[in-house]
Amino acid sequence: MQKNESKFIAWYCYALAGFVIALDQVTKLWADSALAYREIVPVTPFFNITLAYNKGAAFSFLADHSGWQRWFFAALALVAAVVLIVWIWRIKPAERLMSWPLSLVLGGAIGNLIDRLAYGHVVDFLDFFYGRYHWPAFNVADSAIVCGAAWLIWLSFFPSARHSSLDQ
């Protein structure tokens, strides 16, 4: 029974990752078609929608290089995705709560991988700011990766939280 439950959890996780990918791609397509490059659309006093292209990694790391970074970050995302797919497949039912954050990171990694392979850059459009300080623009995939990673860090500090209360 545990093996079947493990595989059910894995497929559920892959579906969650697929939802993250779909939401990410739909919102990026919307931003890319509705906005001009670097156009700013104020939404609140601390949030804009603005179209940006990031050829690098987080915070535009290595964005100003000649193009090799596209393939480097694509390969890195592909390796991360494969590792996460295998990790999720092997997760034990008793640690099912680990599957949620892993799914978020997987969906985000694949969402940004699609952009890198298709366009040579990642489409960013969410711009939070305070006064004149703007956090670097980001997207749904980035949000999923950060939320998933933060959740995994939290679980590492509280190992008992990895186990569902259903298992106790």
Image (cartoon, helix red, strand yellow):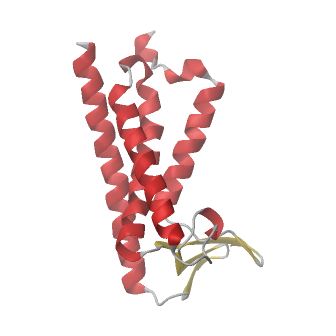
Q: Quadrant of the N terminus?
A: top left
* Residue 93 placement (x, y as % from top left): 36, 19
* Residue 62 placement (x, y as % from top left): 63, 69
* Residue 72 placement (x, y as % from top left): 50, 61
Please give the name of the residue rendered at 48% of the width and 52% of the height, measured from the top-left corner.
Answer: 144
In this rendering, the answer to whether 125 lies above or below 8 is below
In this rendering, the answer to whether 27 lies above or below 64 is above
In this rendering, the answer to whether 146 lies above or below 11 is below
Along the horizontal axis of the image, is 21 left or right of 135? left
* Residue 92 placement (x, y as % from top left): 38, 20
Please give the name of the residue rendered at 51% of the width and 70% of the height, measured from the top-left corner.
Answer: 68
Q: Nearer the viewer, residue 39 or 92?
A: 92
Q: Quadrant of residue 134?
A: bottom right
In this rendering, the answer to whether 65 lies above or below 95 is below
Q: Quadrant of residue 117?
A: bottom left
Q: Is residue 151 visible?
A: yes
Please give the name of the residue rendered at 37% of the width and 54% of the height, measured from the top-left corner.
Answer: 20
Please give the name of the residue rendered at 39% of the width and 60% of the height, measured from the top-left corner.
Answer: 111
Q: Nearer the viewer, residue 66 or 19?
A: 66
Along the horizontal axis of the image, is 6 left or right of 128? left
Q: Is residue 140 visible?
A: no
Q: Quadrant of residue 47?
A: bottom right
